[in-house]
Amino acid sequence: MPLAPKPSGPTAIKISGRKGKNEFINDTYEPMQVAHNDRSCWVARDVAPRYLFNTGKTRWVISNQLDDGARCWAFLGAPKGSTDPLSCPGPWTCAQEDGSWQADPAVKCSPAAPNADKFMQLRLSLDADMKQYGLIELESLKALWRKLDYNGNNVVSLAEIDKLVVEMVAAGTWPEWLNNKPALMRAYKAAVYSKESGAEQGSGNDEYVHKSQFHALLLNLFWYNKLFQIFEEVDTGHDRRIDCSEFQTGMAALGLKMSQDEAKKEFDSIDGNHGGQVLFVEFCAWVRKRVNPDANPNFDPDIVAGEDCNQYMRKSRGDLVTHEHFISKKCFADFDALEAQIKDIVADNTKLLALWTRLDFDGNHIVSLAEIDKLVVEAYPLLNHKPALMRAYKKTITTDSQDKDDWVHKKEFKALLANLFYFNKIFWIFSVVDTEGKDRRLSFDEFKQCMILCNCPLDPATANQQFKKIAKNGNHVLFDQFCAFVTSSQCPQAFTNVLA
């Protein structure tokens, strides 16, 4: 693809004024490093598949794909010789709720100052990277989607996406740096809860990635994995958290020079609970704000999670959202009943073996994340919460140092069942108890409250002793640490006499 001609006018274009259907086209669009139909084209600052380009004929369009513009959200007539939409008289014509097209004089197109931020440059590199791996051309995307959506139902789960990533990396088709679970989770949630999720086709708004969201998923997969690489470089302590010193040093290495006071002020703006450390999700939210300051800070699936995210989605999207699409309301009675059932299975080798046989239908003594997800959906709908499933799965496969692969082995099955239950229950409890920033970290007071809700209350002295034992830095307990502690204390039999 040829390089874009050097623009003679403004290097960024702001679209504003659209209300109602497809109002997400309101954004600032940065010039891309490639041309389309021998003309400059622009991409939205927000990390989403939104492009402003010329069809090669008589229109400038805003669409989710660099193509012929046949399917778009809005278009503007382009006189012969037009080099950018700023020189066109308008008005913009936009798709309406009833499927018709009408001129919308409220939509404005104006010049904007380019964003020279280092992370903006990283965002602008995404499409070039995706092109390198054959993820831009429509036919390539269709072929990859068919591989992912093997049953042809036009939706895929988190487990299926993870399986695809693992296989593509293992085959050498994709680079190894694309296979990181924290980045995968961010990409999945960003795609599922994106503003464009099924806006024009009525899809989305559930826990599946739909065919129309596939490009967004891939874009976010590259974006969050690149951010994860940066985060790991900044995280010199390798504890998945960065402190102020690491932040200042890391930003300087990226060319973002800050004085000590400036770095401290910026770090404090990221560290919402003022605990002195920043997690990957908080880092992602900060970068997003730098890249696109106009984005709604409340609509961030990297920070808003679980049922809280669902509540925000209902409020923000109105009639597009129905209760069937979201996590059903849960209660302690449901969890207590299932806990008794899980403990009974773990303690009864016959029942445990029968359930394992159902899961390991081909009898090879190992199961994948996709197979576990299928069992949960079919047999334990109360535990069908993808973030908790992913964390329980990761905890199970990383506990045994002898099996360094992505499979759950037969001997790990009891531990998997316990992890699945308690990670789900605690994920639900955290949404109620974790009041200090919703950061999945517990203060001592929150820790004591959670222990009570988990039916294992501790006296103050014992609680203080256990808190200090679990908390690495003495200030807070992380979600995974708390889950492991509760699981081992509430269901110790899951970690003894493994299923052979």
Image (cartoon, grey):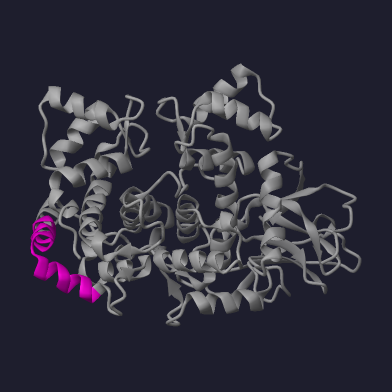
Main SS of the magenta segment? Answer: helix
Residue 412 position (above or below residue 364): above
Bounds of the magenta span? 338-358
Q: Is residue 174 above or below residue 336?
A: below
Tell me residue 455's x, y (percent).
11, 42
Closest to the observer, 299 or 259: 259
Along the line of sight, the residue nearer the viewer: 371 or 324: 371
Quadrant in the picture for the C terminus? bottom left
Left or right: 398 in relation to 452: right
Q: Is residue 133 left or right of residue 421?
A: right
Q: Is residue 283 above or below residue 361?
A: above
Residue 356 lies in the magenta stretch: yes
The residue lying at 49 percent from left, 32 percent from top is 237
Residue 199 location (% of width, % of height)? 50, 66
Where residue 202 sits: x, y (%)?
Answer: 46, 71
Q: Position of residue 382 (x, y in %)?
A: 21, 61
